[in-house]
Structure formats: structure tokens, C-alpha cells
Image (cartoon, rainbow, N blue to C red):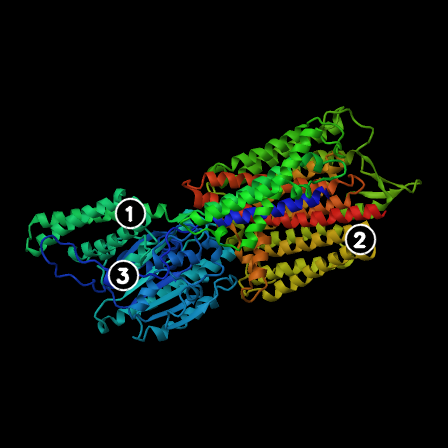
Amino acid sequence: MRLRSSLFACCGLLVLLFGMALFLRGFFPAPVKSFGSAKAKLSGIPEEPVQGLTSNWTKPPSPLFGRVVIMLVDALREDFVFGPKGRQFMPHTRYLVERGSSHSFIAKAWPPTVTMPRIKAMMTGRIPGFIDVIMNLNSPTLLEDNLIWQAKFAGKRILFYGDDTWIRLFPNHFVEHDGTTSFFVSDYTEVDENVTRHLDTILKRNDWDLLILHYLGLDHIGHLAGPNSHLIGPKLSEMDNIVQKIHVELLSKEGETSLPSLLILCGDHGMSDTGSHGGSSNHEVNTPLVFLSPAFRKKDSFTVSEHVEQTDLTSTLALGFGLPIPRNNLGRLILTVLEERPLRERLRYLHLNGYQLSKLVQESIPAYEKDAGYKLFGIAQKSHGSWIKLYLEGNTSETLENLGKKVLRQYMDALKLMSSSLSKIVAQYDMYSMIVGTIIVVEVIFLLIVSTPEALGSTAEFEVPVSSPFYSLLFYLLCLMFAAIHVVVCTSMKTSCYFCNVSWLLVATVIVLIAAVQCVLLSTLWKRCTNGKPQHKSCATLDSSWSELDLLLLLGTFGHTLSLGSSSFIEEEHQTWYFLINTLLLVFFQDVCRKYFAASDPKGKPKQSRNPEDIYCNEQQTTIHGLLGASYCDQKDDKSKVYLRSGGSCEKWLALSSPWVVLVFCRVLRCLNQTGIQWAHEPDFGHWLTSSSHRIELSILTAIFLFLIFILVQRTCSSVSKAALALGLVGIYCYRAAVGNVTFPWKPEKHDISKGITEARFVYVFILGILFTGVKDLLKSAVAFPDTTTNCRGLWEMYNGLVLLAALLLRPHNLPVLLFILVVQMILTRFIWRILDYDAAQITIIYYWFSQVSFYFQGNSNSIATVDISAGFVGFENYVELPAVFLTLFSTYIGPLLWAVHLICYMSSERSRYCSASVGHSCYCFVLLRAIPASAYIILVTSLRYHLFVWSVFSPKLLYEGMHTLVTAAACVMFTAMDQKRMITILKN
């Protein structure tokens, strides 16, 4: 079968994407032990260990607290309470921490630091799997043993108000509840008022035992404006007033109950310096955990808070409430909370926690007898029994006290070791699904690499042996072999496997796909070996010499791929791209100098007679060059040619200076957003702009940037689209003013802040109008009037609509990144490409590099924390899943998408400059640039799956690779459509 290289590459990328999806499903693991609906019971609690005597403590321990209030403030960083902001904005809470009856801790949350996994961790004591970061969007019912179920089973009356994630996780568990949506991040006022409005009534009632409050406003402010926003202080003060109200009301009712009350102030996760979360930086994983109760002694002085695990809350709260510890709990009892209790009670609670962990060790670790923590727990139990014997005999000597302290230390050490052992095996990989996905990915990438010479040939089409494998014996033998392997693996596996549980139709399809791709690969290799080199050379060049640019692009691309094997290079990947793009710009300057001043072109050949300042093009392209704004076309006497004059020496110096202009842009944008891990905490220009004291400066710069964006984009717009673009950019400023990011010149003081729904929808109207104009022109050129000019105009209209959408979704301080993209694209098309004879493959690689550096200039990184989810709610009253996902994905990959679409527009417009195969070459190279690092990373991450940083570094990067490949696949579909249409037009003509 003869295929265009663009169609072949697009199909290959889609198959590779399917393989990646299967690999991701196997890589992100499920819990190693799933006890389903099995729950811990009071009847299963062991008796107090004793040697030779009968203990008088045979029943489960009594509760330590009566009514408990859990006040969870979403994204509450520990420094918001224990740091300077806590002292300034939360004075009452800070006083209770320093001088009140309290115990305060810094609780560490395991990544991923998003809400649903953290709620699971606090209620079950288990470390959730990394896949929970995706399930966070649609939380399923929690079936495993947890505190909420235990409390309900024990007859406790539970009330809940706040984030509706709790209601989805624990349906039918609350006697009263009122949920608020956690995904509408533009609302940070009503979402908390809807919780607080219940307090006055609830706190006066005595018909409840556990009250849970989950406040979302602080998290929403972080997503909207970051931790340094002027909105943070008032929100912390609001939370402080609520703590004071609850604490005072609980104290006023102390005489009415036999047991003291307990108020717990905590955060589910922290907040990064950009206002997001999901990663593993200190500000994201460190949260405050404050226990307030009259049962505690008042403090004389404030000491640095002790560090605990967030999962430690589970066992502490269960024992404090007189409940069994949840069966899957990995947490340890926070002994400081029980320091006022007698030694016998503390030993009893430690024994119960140790017994629960030892049972989990027995069920999870095959050689549990050799586990150091398990053995130490056995020793501690015997020592505990000896202490109980002395205690019951009435011994009051110093020996009893010393032995008790020794047992206490033994229990604490045993709990620490067992918890650590269980944490290391918290999840397992679905290796079979991973292997099948890897096989598909490896086969596709090898097939793409082997087919590269033919795909980049002069016709951009080649013979693919698709039908022959289906008639070969090898294909059927491979199908039988893979089917047999599948049956053997699935019948012998002791653990759950996704690929073994799918339908046989899907399994058969995958087996046929793997066998067919393997046969095509072998046929292509055999053809290459027998026929030698490809017959058709590339239309882009007639020689095989390598220029400095070729070497840089090749070594840079493969060097970056190899760097993905290092966790440090992944964390600081932006530094790799900054270095590569700076080097590329220096090569640009060298080639321009060589073009004007040396006697050879960039590839070292003698200068051609073609003057870079005198360029000819077909008369048909006059309108297209006008659209690009590259120069003007004057029609000569010969009406088959159009002569482009480029301005003589003026343009020469503009071309010589253009690489340095871009280099200066790059250096400035590096200071805009500190990204990565090592220097993410350092101050940057973006933080300076977004601070409340510099809102006027940000407003002025935003207006200037929007005006410059209009100047750059309007060149390729029709008259109607120009008006829509201008009104849309004005609407963007109004939207940002409405949500409080910028101010109006006539209202410099503070004004009422809204959600900006009307303003954003006003902009959406113009975006859709421009996109509709582009689609109309594309359909017109494809169906009614096959005209290349109309087709190009439609593509540029589509591009302009996407630019307007990008300007709406980007935060105001990030508008320079969009301006950078537009300026560099103008410089490349007006100066660099016109002067230097780069072929389509080289231009595609250069575009890809600029797309990557734009991604990091925007402030993105390989941490989930840098994903700006607030973009998914621009213009929406409520959470709507599909638009929210699309807008979030688009805002994250604005750089790669705009560069890819611009490449399509440029290649389709410059038909006279490049051969008919240029679009196919660009598409094929674009696919290779995405497929090579993605495939290599899958192999690398498989080999590093037990690395110390697999969940904090390698796993987030794997998700980014998958989403980037999906975005590239969408761009490739556009490439393929344009290439197919172009060939049809050529054949018709």
C-alpha cells in the first residue's frame, strides 16, 4: 500500500499513543492489598499482654474525647499558621499554639498532594496510589476500612459541611451534610460562607459527636492568585475567626459532657509558590496539625513543632475516639497527644497500634518473621507483659518506671520500622500491561525510524507492506504465540491485571496489532537490506553534507532524550532547553553572517546565484505573502513572476540582529517564572508583578502586551476578524479587572471583585466567531472552491482564534510569553527563513525546540503543582467536566500548540518556497520528535520503577509525556488533513 508520509506518521503516533495508554494503566498501581469491605472490629482488639497473671483490662479502651471537630482548611501551608503570616493574620490560633491547651505538629503529606488522596490518607491511614491524582476529578465511593465507617458503626452521629468530595467518598455516612463544589476555583467567598452559615446553629446543639468542616476558599485563592496575593491575608483572618468561634463555643459546653472536646485544625495539602499543588516541594507537603482541647496542659512557651506523618492522624483519632484502628492503617500513634495520660494507658494504646501494624505486616510481607519491626514488636510485647506483671503485683520501685520507659521506646521504634516497611510496598505494578504497552511503543518507534529515509524522500510517500504480512505464515504464528502467552500469563498470575480483565475482542485486536506491526517492521528491514539506499532523495537538499545546524539539532535532540534517565535533569529540564535554544540562536547568527559575508552558504557549499534579497514566487502566492507580512510583491512585466524586494542593507542588519533580539527575549523570560525544583522558591519577576503592591504596574504592562498582541496578530486577519480580535482583547482586560488581577485606570483603588463570568463569555463569543470564520474558509476551499489562498486564510484565522483564547487563559503576568511566541514567529518568517535555505525537516525541529522552551517560560515544570487548573473555569458558573479539561489542557500546552499550528500555517502558505512534500516531511519529523523521547522514557522509567524518586519525579513526568503525545497527535491530524488536501489539489491541477 502506498501511503503519504504524513498519514503513515499520524497512524504510527496513534498506535504509539494506544501503547502508552496501556503502559500508563499498568504503571500507576493499585494498592498492594485490597481488603474490600472487611473492617476492623472491637471484638478483634487484643487483650493487654501479661505474663502469669490475668489483666483487669480486658475490654477495649474507653474514648478520651467526647465531641470532636475537624476543621480542614484546603491548601493550608504550615507557614500560614506557624510562620509570619500566621502571627499577622491568625493571632488567636497562634496564641493557642504558643500559650494555650494545645499540641501542634507539622504533618507531612505524601505526593500526589491533591485533595481526594489526602482525605483517603487521613481517614484510612493508607498512602493512596499515584493514580488517585486522576481519580481526584471523579471520586468513587471509599469501600476500605476508614474512620468515618468506624464512627458510624459505633453509633456516632457525624455532620459534614464543605467539599463534596467527602460526600462522594462516604455516601450515606453523615446524618447531615451540605456539600460545596471543589472545582469552581473562581469562587473563594460563597464557597466558605456556605460552610460557616451552619456553625451558629450546630455548635449550640448537643445531638452530634463528630463535626467535619472542609473550607475551600484558601485553595481557590492560591489557584487564582498565588500565596502572595493580597487575598490570602483576609482569608486567613476569616479562618482564625472561625477557629475562635468553635473553640470558645466548645469550651462553654465543657460542663455539660463527661469527656473533654477536641478541635483539630489541619490542611489536606500545602500550596506551592505559584499557588498550585500536587508536587512534592516543602510548601506542598508540609501542613499544620493542631490539637486544641482542655484535656491538654497549657503551654509556658512555644517550641518548634514536631514533624509527623499525615497518616498518623488516623490511629491517633481512632484511639482517642475509642474506635478500632482501620485495618489498612500505616500511621503511628502521636504519643505527644497522650502525654498527660498514665503510663499504663500509653503502653496500651501503643500495643494496639503495634498489633494492627503487625497483622498488616503478616498479610503483606511473605517473610514477615525477618522484618526488623515485626521482631522488635514481639520483644516489646514480652517486655510489656513483664511490666504489667510488676504493676499488678503493686511494685512501685524505680525499676517499674525504667522498664516502662524502655517498653515505650521499644514500641515506638517497632511502629516506626513496621510503618516504614509497609510504606515501601504500598503498591505493585501491573507488569503484564506495562510489557504489552512497551512492546507496542518499541515496535512503532523502530518502524518510524527505519522508514525515515523513504518518508523524507522527494515525493513524501512510499510503499508500506501492509497487506503482505496478513498472507504470511509468520503473522499467524506470531498471533498464536502471543495468544498462548496471554493465556498462560493470565491463568498463572496471583494479582489483578488490567489486560487480563478486558474483553477477548480487545485482546485479540491488540495481538493482531502487535503481530502485524512486527511483520511490517521485518518486511521493511528486509526491503532495506535487499534494495540498499532509498531511490528518491529529499527534495529539500541535493547533498548529504552535514552543517553545524544539522549536528546541533541531532545531538541536542538525542542528548535531551538521554538526559531523561536522571532525576535531576527531569526536575530541571527547563535548563536543558534554555541551553539548547541559546545555542541554536548563536548558530542562526553564524549562518546569517556566513550568508552575507562569507563565500559559502550554511552548508559549506559555494554561494548560489540566488540573491537572498531578490526572491521570486508564483503570482498565485501574492496574497499569501501579504498575509504573512513577509514583504510586498510587485508584479513585473512578466506576469508569471512576482518580484519581492527586501529592503537592501537595512534588511541585512535586521537579519543579523534578529538572533540577538530573540536571545534577549529568552533571557528576560527566564526571570519571569522560576520553575523546576532547585530554584523554584527564589523570587522572580512574576511574583513581583502579582503582588498586591504592584497591581498598577501589572495593569499597565497588561494593557501594553494586549495592544502589542493585536499589532502582531492583525496582520493575518480579515477586516471582520480584526474587529473581533480588538474587542476580544478589550474583553480580556475587563475580565482580568473583574477578577481582581488588574485595575481600570479610572478606578485605581480597590473595587468589588466578581467571577468575571460575563466578561469571559463576551470574549468567548469573539473567539468562536474567529474560529468559525476560519472553519468556513477551510470548508469553502475544500468543497466549493479549491483555492489555496482561501485555504491559507482559513488556517491563519484558526491560528488567530487560538491566540485570542491563549490570551484569555494565561494569567496577566504570563502575557509576555505569548508575546514572545508571536515575535519570534514573526522574526523567523520575515528574516531567518527568507535568508537561510533551511529545509522542512530543519524548520520543524527548530519549531519543536521553541515550543518546548515556551512551555517552560510559561512557568510549567515536570511537577503536577504547576498545572493551572483555574484556567478550566474561566467563564463558567459551575464545574463542567469536558470544557474544564479542554481549557486546562490548552492553557498548559499553549506553547507547543501555537508553535505546531503556526508550522502548519507556514508550510501551507509557503508552497512556492518548498516542494510539495514539505508538509509531509514536517509532519513526519514532528511525530519523530515526540515519539523518540516518549518511547525512550517509557523504557527508562520501567527500569527505574523502584527508584527513590519514582513517585515524586518520574511519575509526574510520565503523565506529562502522555499528555504531550496526545496534544501532538491532535496537531498531526491537522498536518495529515492539510497534506492530503494539498496532494488532491495538485492532482486536480
Q: Marks 3 and 1: in contact by CB < 8 Å?
A: no
Q: Residue furthest right?
A: 637
Residue 349 image point, x, y percent = 22, 56
Q: Residues within 10 Å of mark 3 (few under 14, many from 20)?
A: many
Count of marks overlaid on the render: 3
Dot label at residue 324? 3
Residue 916: quadrant of the picture: top right
Q: Is residue 506 above or below residue 903?
A: below
Q: Residues within 10 Å of mark 2 (few under 14, many from 20)?
A: many
Dot label at residue 790? 2
The disc, 2 or 1, on the residue closer to the chain's N-terminal end is 1
The disc, 1 or 3, on the residue closer to the chain's N-terminal end is 3
- Can you identify the residue that label 1 sits on? 418
Q: Is residue 293 visible?
A: no
| Dot in front, 2 or 1 | 1
Q: Please give the name of the residue rendered at 26% of the width and 64% of the height, measured from the top-left corner.
A: 321
The disc, 2 or 3, on the residue closer to the chain's N-terminal end is 3
- Residue type at mark 1 is Met
Residue 253 relative to residue 738: left or right: left
Q: Please give the name of the residue rendered at 12% of the width and 47% of the height, measured from the top-left corner.
A: 402
Q: Is residue 933 visible?
A: yes
Dot 2: element: helix
Q: Please give the name of the residue rendered at 76% of the width and 29% of the height, measured from the top-left corner.
A: 542
